[in-house]
Amino acid sequence: MNISSARIKVRTAGFTVVELMIVIVVIAILAIIVLVAYNGVQTNTNNSRTLTGIQQYYTSIKLYHAKNGRYPTVPNEGSAQVTMACLGTGYPGGTCGTITGTTVSESASFMTTLRQGSGTSITGVVNDQAGSVGGESFIGAAYGIDTTTTAHSPTGRARMIEWFLAGKNQNCKIPQAWAYNTSHNNTACELDLEPY
C-alpha cells in the first residue's frame, strides 16, 4: 500500500448543523420550562400577598365589629344596590375596580372609621395586581354592600369583602369565603359578613 496515495480523513474543529439544531432545541425546551415555573411562582406570590392583605383587613373589620357591635359602613350605603369602598388607599386612579357594574373608589373617611373603630393602623393596598373575572375588574379588594346568592343571604344582598386571585378555580383560603366566578384565568372570591 502506498502511503502517499492513502487518504487520511481529518475532522476539523466545529459542530455539524444537526448538532447545533439539537443544542438549540434543548435550550428552547429549558427556557420554556423556566418561564412556566417562573410564572407559577409569580402567580403564587401575588395570590399569597393578596390573601395576607385580605386577612389583615378582615381582622380589622372583625375587631371593629367586636368593639362597636356592628360592621363599619361605607359612604352612601343604602343609596344604591351596590355601595362599596376599596380596602386601603394608594390604588391607581383612586379606584380598585368595577364590581357589579359599579366603580369602587377609595374612601378616606371609611379607612379612618375602620382604623379608629378597630384600633388598628392598617392603610395600604391589598395588592396592586389587576385582573378581571366575568365582567368585573379588580385591583386589590373591596368592602361593602353587593348582591349575592340567596343561599348566602335571604335578601340577595350582603355586607362583604370581594377580591380576585390569579388562576382558575383557586381556593379563596379565608374561612367561609367562596369563589363566585372563575373566568379569564382568574377567580373572584367573596366573604359574606352579614345579610343586608
Image: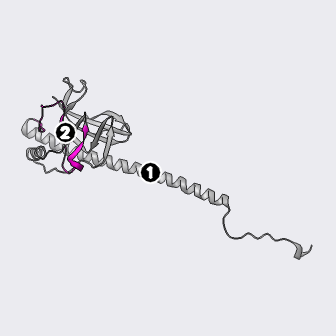
Above or below for 121 versus 102: below
Q: How is the image coloured?
A: one colour
Q: Residues within 10 Å of mark 1 (few under 14, many from 20)?
A: few
Of badges 2 and 1, the one in the foreground is: 2
List x then y, in percent, for residue 174.
26, 39
Q: Which residues are magenta?
A: 70-98
List x then y, in percent, for residue 89.
18, 49
The answer to whether residue 193 is left or right of residue 34 is left
Looking at the image, tell me whether mark 2 or mark 1 is earlier in sequence order.
1
Regarding mark 1 in the picture, which secondary structure is present there?
helix
Regarding mark 2 in the picture, which secondary structure is present there?
strand
Above or below for 69 versus 139: above
Q: Which numbered tag is attached to residue 109?
A: none
Q: Residues within 10 Å of mark 2 (few under 14, many from 20)?
A: many
Q: CA–CA distance between discs 2 and 1?
A: 33 Å
Above or below for 21 versus 126: below
List x then y, in percent, for residue 177.
26, 35
Give the residue type at disc 2.
Answer: Tyr
Q: Which residue is mark 1?
A: 37
The answer to whether residue 42 is left or right of residue 72 is right
Give the residue furthest to the right: 1
**Residue 78 highlighted magenta (yes or no):** yes
Q: Pick the residue in front: 141 or 178.
A: 141
Does the magenta stretch mainly form a helix, a strand or a loop? Answer: loop
Give the residue type at disc 1.
Answer: Ala
The answer to whether residue 178 is left or right of residue 7 is left
**Quadrant into which the N terminus falls:** bottom right
Above or below for 148 versus 103: above
Q: Which numbered tag is attached to residue 143?
A: 2
